[in-house]
Image: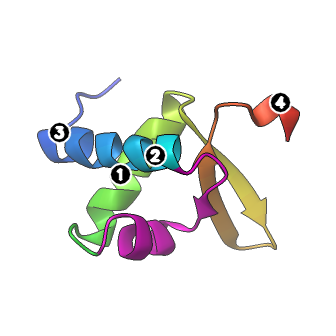
Amino acid sequence: MCPVSRATTRIAKEILRYTKKNPEAADTAEGIALWWLHSKYPLAEVKEALDHLVSQSLLVLVWRRESQRLYRSAEGKEAR
């Protein structure tokens, strides 16, 4: 596994904090960048953090329609 940058780690922590406070939240990468992170980071960096969280099984990726990818917390995913 490749090392994770400090920026990716920082963004990932913010995303996890958001999902702890809002456990039912789910959004696209663009929505997360805009609404969860208030456009503080470039979309490419947000996507990198999301990919990292999915690879660590901390977020799950849900396909909605053919091309829309939603991310949400992996906690409690069996109950959904």
Which of pointers 3 and 4 lies earlier in the amino acid sequence? Answer: 3
| Badge 4 amino acid | Glu
Q: Secondary structure at mark 1?
A: helix
Q: Which residues are magenta?
A: 22-38
Question: 42 or 75: nearer the eye?
Answer: 75
In this picture, is 37 found above or below 67? Answer: above
Residue 78: give its label. 4
Rounded to the nearest angstrom, the CA distance separating label 3 from label 4 is: 31 Å
Question: Does the segment drawn in magenta span residue 41?
Answer: no
Please name the residue shown 35% across and 47% down the image: 49
**Which residue position is annotated with label 1?**
48
Rounded to the nearest angstrom, the CA distance separating label 1 from label 4 is: 25 Å
Q: Quadrant location of residue 1? A: top left
Question: 20 or 66: nearer the eye?
Answer: 20
Contact (Cβ within 8 Å) of mark 3 with mark 4: no
Please name the residue shown 61% across and 57% down the image: 25
Q: Secondary structure at mark 4?
A: helix
